[in-house]
Amino acid sequence: MAAVRESTAKNSSAGRQDKKKVRNAVLAVFLLLLVSGAAGAGFWGVRKLLFDANPRFLLREIRVNGSGYWKDHAGDLAEKIGLKKGTNLFALDVKKIRKDLARVPNVENSFIYRILPDTLIIRVTERVPRAFLSRENSPLVADGNAVVMPRSQSMRSYARLPVIMDVSLRGIKSGDSFEKIKPAMELIMTAVRDYPDITIYRISLRDPKKLHVYLKYKYNRFNIHHLVLPVRNRGMKFMLMAYQSAVINAHRIGETRNNYDLSYDGKCVIR
């Protein structure tokens, strides 16, 4: 009987010890969380004091690095995206700035850097204009991906570029991707990349199924050719290769006619 009582007493004592351990563990976790929260709040307060609310880190200078229009118009770019001097550098939302820059028609890519204590660097890659739209003195140009942008805010804005003619600009705004001119832009970019001896002056879109291209080859300094090719066929690279072969052969035999028609399944007919 005494053994039973002794066993019961031991079990009761062990149970009290287990409960005490649990209480101590819970208390330790609570204290740890409390200390962590206080440390976090303290860190946040110190960070805010040292960085976010520090008047030494106010934005005073905005620089634009690049090789295009915005390099010399940093203030205009900052105004366009709503970036104001006097804002704390660490309070700036860099992701939002990049999104705002992406909406600027002639900005293709951008990177943002902070330079302490007071400078923000914006490095932009600008879209390169490849064609005038509608007429040579048009206020709108397009890049190789048919993105429309204002001529006045584009690099090389007064360089000699091909003109995409007979196209309506009604409803077209800067920043739009202009689907109708994509075949013409594909032809222009193919010539730029692969055929430096070909100079394109004008492309007419008056025929929805064909491109009427006015261009010259290096042999013909004063003789502009009229090239007709289908919009959808074997690709612009094949078309320009066929045109180049025809021009070289025509030059060899003394052919002087100016009309080259590739709308017959890629075969070139000279008229």
Image (cartoon, grey):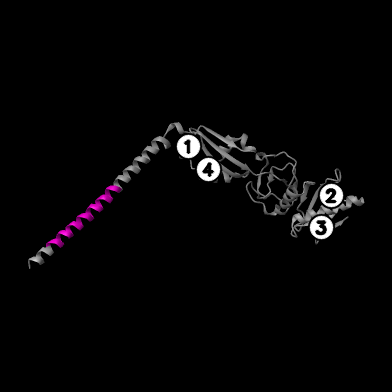
| Mark before the other along the chain sequence, 2 or 1 | 1
Q: Which residue is mark 3?
A: 262
| Mark before the other along the chain sequence, 2 or 3 | 2
Label 2: which secondary element: strand
- Main SS, magenta region, reads helix
> What amino acid is labelled 3 in the image?
Leu
Label 3: which secondary element: strand
> What amino acid is labelled 4 in the image?
Ile
User: Circle 4: is it few (<14), some (14-19), or many (20+) Cα within 10 Å?
Assistant: some
Which is more toward the observer, 11 or 44? 11
| Mark before the other along the chain sequence, 2 or 4 | 4
**Which label was assigned to residue 225?**
2
Expressed as whole percent of the image width and height from the top left, the position of residue 36 reads 32, 46
- Circles 2 and 1, Cβ within 8 Å, touching? The answer is no
Label 4: which secondary element: helix
Q: Residue furthest bottom?
A: 1
Expressed as whole percent of the image width and height from the top left, the position of residue 146 reads 67, 50
Q: Quadrant of residue 52?
A: top left
Q: Quadrant of the N terminus?
A: bottom left
Q: Residue at x 22, y 54 (%)?
A: 23
**Which label was assigned to residue 97?**
4
Q: Quadrant of residue 42?
A: top left
In magenta, the rendered stretch is: 9-32
| Mark before the other along the chain sequence, 1 or 3 | 1
Q: Residue at x 75, y 54 (%)?
A: 237
> What amino acid is labelled 2 in the image?
His
- Circles 1 and 3, Cβ within 8 Å, touching? The answer is no
Q: Nearer the viewer, mark 1 or mark 4?
A: 1
As measured in the structure, the alpha-carbon distance from the residue carrying label 2 to the one carrying label 1 is 57 Å
As measured in the structure, the alpha-carbon distance from the residue carrying label 3 to the one carrying label 4 is 48 Å
Expressed as whole percent of the image width and height from the top left, the position of residue 35 reads 30, 45
